[in-house]
Image (cartoon, rainbow, N blue to C red):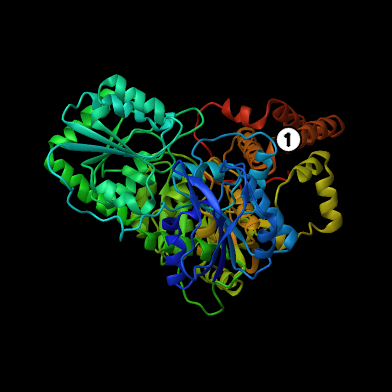
Amino acid sequence: MRVLRIFHSAVVDGWRERERQLRRGGTDVDLLTARRWNEGGADVRLVPRPGEPVRGLRTWGRHPALFVYSPLPLWRALGGTYDVIDVHEEPFALSTAEVLLLRRLRGQRAPYVLYSAQNIAKRYPPPFRWLERWALRHAAGLSVCNSEAGRICERKGLPGHATLIPLGVDMRSFTPAPRPGSGGRVVGYVGRLAPHKGVEVLLKAVAGMHDTTLRVAGAGPDESSLRACAEALGISARVDFAGSLAQEALPDFYRSLDVLAVPSLPTPGWLEQFGRVVVEAMACGVPVVASDTGALPDVVADAGLLVPPGDPEALRSALAGLLDDDGLRHDLAQRGLARAQQSSWPEVARAYRALYDTAVLPSEAVDGPGVRRGVEVVVVAYGRADLLAAALEPVRSLPVTVVDNSSSPDVAEVCARLGVRYLDPGRNAGFGAGVNHALARRLDPDADVLLLNPDAVVELHDVQRLHEALLEDPTLASVGPSQVDEEGRASRVTWPFPSPGRAALAASGLTGILGRVLGNAHSDADSFVIGSVLMLRREALAQVGGFDEDFFLYAEETDWAYRAHLLGWRHREVLQARAVHAGAATSSDSARRDTHFHASQERYLRKHFGPARWQLARTATIVGSALRGTLLPGERGRQARARATLYVTGPLEAEAALAPTAPPTARASAPSEV
């Protein structure tokens, strides 16, 4: 695999170890970075190692989100043959927009992946908001250094699943060693000297620790005020400002400490996004006391102590307690070493190679005909044990998991009698959450997954036909059988993806007319298969991730299928396979069911097309439904008027106003035309 990686902070030699490890593992990586960049308060110039395939580009601007590269070298590089383009910049950054624009103009077809550390859900002004949305919606993957950044990007339009990859540490350089010198206790700080880093809080904490020295490594705009603060506190003789240290000098600095303090402060516009110094100190066997803010709790976990941010007394108590307790300090040092190993450069490189492998799907064949692998069945139930038993009987020889959103003893009894796994999540968070609960506890992680409604019956030989069709075409993310009801009447299985334009056509009544004229023609490239009986490819699940749990009852599979579609996957009905879908498990309250359905449509259109286009679709629905309600007689006119009223209120608002009663036990067999 050949990768073009663009990362301005790769100007730091130690941070290029990721690329070196990737190359050792067989990945060919060309690296573009800045010629010079300010890191940790000091300018760093690119100094390539002999033969290292890294090129420094001139940059304009100094802010990580507000700079651009010299375009000509980028243009030339993007003309190369690559499997993946790794843009290690924030999705909203100008440099990201520049790279993606040149990629498009250059005709570069390789998929791209992005990076994000932004763990505050910010709504950027135009054009940054538009650039961010476009970049995310077309990305084949995203790496994040904290889980909240991934959740934010997924909500903002990332079609796939964000991959959590820690920032790396060189476990060969950052190694434990006895602290040099004798006597005295030493607390340390490494980082930028800026207000949000909380160094003044640390000075106040150390002021009450009379036998303790503080060593501060770093530079920044607060250096003079922090020196003055130390003087005012009467501790300047116990505070050593070491200045900005080169990367190669940091291991010895950490090893000179008894404990590292990371006193970061949350601000309205910033939270600690990872805390690389935490892992570096842990790798050197130095325990850590950090603020309980941002990503620090995830990074520290049980390998350090957390204190409330901005509280000198709490910080002093934690530092003093740790310095006084040799056993605790040793225990945290050992835990920290194990924790740091997870961030070693070989581990980070393996995670990036897995991200790249996933990003090229489905452009590269993932399986071929004749490949043997299993199928795992997932059923989300809500009561109706009689229907569930009928659904499970034909597939009980396969690995089966039933997630019981109703916590029903009858459902548990059916599962025990038929010998299938029963999971009770303890709450009803909806169909998508139930599926995700099972996916997180796979019986066979290497199998493809069959989602089966408890009111649907599919025979084992039809499951095998579905699986054969899925494996024959490596671009298929999902397949579903043709369906009939209990009377043998055919049900529609394949639908075009909803859009604001289709919503307007449905409101006007033209969808049915055009469907009769065109025969409901649509292509696999622009359609999905309903989720009552649906087989999902494991590779697509790995790239797209699970279901969006904001969709409680309807449109979960539509949203998942559309995200897969954005990543290049397709969906298809397999006519050679058949299922019987009774549809008897849906709610008898049609008004409530319609409210839930249209609320999910609003979620879907807002998520994938934005608030403005949703409002256009809403307006068209109100106008079209009102006209039809005036012109159509009887029940059809009543339904049209009810829909107009629902959309005037707003489906999501109407759903929020519903009384909290038991939800439908399963989803409807097909969406209405919107």
Question: Seen from this angle, which residue lies furthest bottom?
Answer: 370
Q: Position of residue 193 (x, y in %)?
A: 41, 34
Q: Is residue 3 above or below residue 416?
A: below
Residue 115 seen in the figure: no
Q: Residue at x 36, y 49 (%)?
A: 412
- Which residue was labeled with disc 1? 612
Residue 614 seen in the figure: yes
Name the side, left or right, on which 97 lies relative to 165.
Answer: right
Q: Position of residue 10 (x, y in %)?
A: 50, 55
Quadrant of the image containing the N terminus: bottom right
Name the side, left or right, on which 416 lies relative to 554.
Answer: left
Looking at the picture, tell me which residue is in the foreground, 674 or 60.
60
Looking at the picture, tell me which residue is in the foreground, 584 or 303.
303
Q: Residue at x 56, y 77 (%)?
A: 368
Q: Residue at x 43, y 71 (%)?
A: 24
Q: Is residue 131 above or below residue 494?
A: above
The picture quadrant where one finds residue 300 is top left
Q: Classify mark 1: helix, strand or loop.
A: helix
| Label 1: few (<14), some (14–19) or many (≥20) C-alpha neighbours in 10 Å | few
Looking at the picture, tell me which residue is in the foreground, 170 or 583.
170
Q: Position of residue 651 (x, y in %)?
A: 65, 32
Looking at the picture, tell me which residue is in the foreground, 559 or 338.
338
Q: Residue at x 38, y 46 (%)?
A: 276
Please tell me how many numbered marks the rendered image carries: 1
Quadrant of the image containing the C terminus: top right
The picture quadrant where one finds residue 516 is bottom right
Dot 1 amino acid type: Ala
Q: Position of residue 435 (x, y in %)?
A: 47, 50
